[in-house]
Amino acid sequence: MRVGDSTIEVLVFDLFGVLIAFDDDLVTARLAPHCADPTDAFERLHKLTARHDVITGERTLPQVHRELVDTYGLTLPYPEFEAAWLEPYHQPIAGMAELVEALLRHYRLVLLSNVDRAYWRVVRGMQPELQHFEFLLVSCDLGRAKPDQEVFQHVCQLTGTEPKQCFFVDDTGQNVEAARALGFHGHVFRSVPELRAVLEQANASGL
């Protein structure tokens, strides 16, 4: 596979929005009704599960629970809060597992995802295609999150490659631009057919 004058050896995939569809506001919707002001809580806790201190492991799930109790008057005891947090809010994107299986025979695959430690265990247990990835790099283990350039540098260090040998797929343009600034090639994911067309145009093997 060639992009410009570069030969691609490593394909780096985001998890949420690329391999699996998700709606993390479902978590907020489960919690808000148990807060003192449900409407205010729902608005202010938008994207709670994507908060930087949560996905990098700075703040643990028990600490998040305590914060919601103190700040929003959450009445759920911790076991029920944890169950609401861990109930799946994702589903596979049709065609992505098959695409990954086609590519793994020809390329090194790396997962690069922003996810909290508790939900990562849920996702990992539900997505068998993750076994095909050489490295599973998640923000809760790295202590850093996309679009921090250090996470992309870490990909190169682990794989022993240069940025120009890596092709990064993410559904967030800011993350793709951060990778490109380091020298990665990148694609902002919108659909499986579009991604497949981009890979075919680059003469990717296995398709």
Image (cartoon, rainbow, N blue to C red):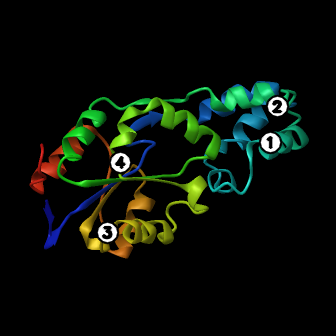
| Rendered location of residue 153, percent (x, y) | 43, 72
Q: Earlier in the sequence, mark 4 or mark 2?
A: 2
SS at badge 1:
helix
**Mark 1: amino acid:** Pro
Marks 4 and 2 in Cβ contact (< 8 Å): no
Picture disc at residue 62: 1
Which residue appears at 74% of the width and 48% of the height?
Answer: 60
Picture disc at residue 133: 4
Query: Which residue is identified by label 3?
Result: 184
| Rendered location of residue 196, percent (x, y) | 19, 44
Distance from the alpha carbon under mark 1 to that under mark 4? 31 Å
Q: Nearer the viewer, mark 1 or mark 4?
A: 4
Distance from the alpha carbon under mark 3 to that under mark 1? 37 Å
Query: Which residue is identified by label 2?
Result: 78
Number of residues whose C-alpha sits closer than 10 Å to that of mark 1, classed few (under 14), some (14–19) or many (20 or more): few
Marks 2 and 1 in Cβ contact (< 8 Å): yes
Q: Quadrant of residue 165?
A: bottom left
**Mark 3: amino acid:** Phe
Q: Is residue 139 above or below residue 97?
A: below
Distance from the alpha carbon under mark 4 to that under mark 3? 19 Å
Picture disc at residue 29: none
In this rendered view, identify the residue nearer to me: 121 or 30. Answer: 121
Q: Quadrant of residue 183?
A: bottom left
Q: Is residue 123 above or below residue 157?
A: above
In this rendered view, identify the residue nearer to me: 121 or 86. Answer: 121
Judge left or right: residue 103 versus residue 188: left
Q: Nearer the viewer, mark 4 or mark 2?
A: 4
